[in-house]
Amino acid sequence: MDLEITALHRNHTWDLVQQPSAVNIIGYKWVHKLKHKPDGSTERYKARLVAIGYNQTPHLDYFETFSPVVKAAIIRIILTVALSFKWELRQLDIHNVFLNGELEKQVYITQLPGYVDTKFPTKVCRLKKALYGLKQAPCAWFQRLNSAL
């Protein structure tokens, strides 16, 4: 959990602000997963902070949720063409990928128990970047990737 919080802070995922009146405070939960090595032994424990997106209200917390999805048939065609022309293939894996999507609409969560800022215990977190679980997270990530490419 400490590593996830460190990544969120390093990414400037939120700012601490006074809670505005009449805003929807989104809940969150920790999702824990045990990662295994190929031989079946334990590699590490992983914790991810996930927003409870089903509490979001359309047009209040988000506008759009669309994100394009590649069909398996398209991937097979691209791989077939690449193999036939002997092109070099590369894979890109981005850790905490959704945390790079910038939010257009303001979304708020409470401070996390155990990680409350002692100087500002009554403030809430205004998200600047998406968290896993937010309805708009895939769309925000795609917009960021599209502008970068």
Image: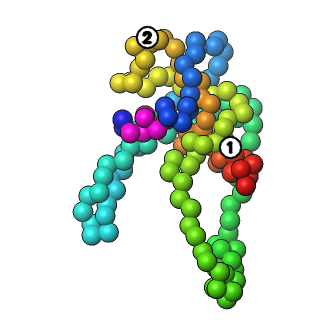
Q: Indicate the position of residue 31 as horizontal and vertical percent values.
A: 41, 43
* Placement of 129 over or under 66, stated as above or below: above
Q: Indicate the position of residue 92 as horizontal and vertical percent values.
A: 56, 62
Q: Which residue is mark 1?
A: 140
Task: Say if the magenta span includes residue 115.
Answer: no
Q: Indicate the position of residue 88 as horizontal and vertical percent values.
A: 61, 77
Q: Which mark is residue 31?
A: none
81 or 50, nearer to the observer = 81
Judge from the rendering whether residue 116 lies leftward or rightward of residue 72; answer left or right: left
Judge from the rendering whether residue 34 lies leftward or rightward of residue 11; answer left or right: left
Q: CA distance from mark 2 to mark 1?
A: 31 Å
Whether residue 133 is visible to the viewer of this picture, yes or no, is no
Q: Indicate the position of residue 15 as horizontal and vertical percent values.
A: 57, 23
Residue at the (75%, 48%) spot, across then down: 147
Q: Residues within 10 Å of mark 1 (few under 14, many from 20)?
A: many
Q: Residues within 10 Å of mark 2 (few under 14, many from 20)?
A: few
Q: Quadrant of the N terminus?
A: top left
Q: Which residues are magenta?
A: 3-8
Residue at the (58%, 12%) spot, across then down: 18
User: Is label 2 in a helix, a strand or a loop?
Assistant: loop
Q: Amino acid at mark 2?
A: Lys
Q: Which residue is mark 2?
A: 119
Indicate the quadrant where residue 129 lies: top right
Q: Amino acid at mark 1?
A: Ala
| Scheme of image coloration | rainbow
User: Is label 1 in a helix, a strand or a loop?
Assistant: helix
Residue at the (58%, 16%) spot, across then down: 17
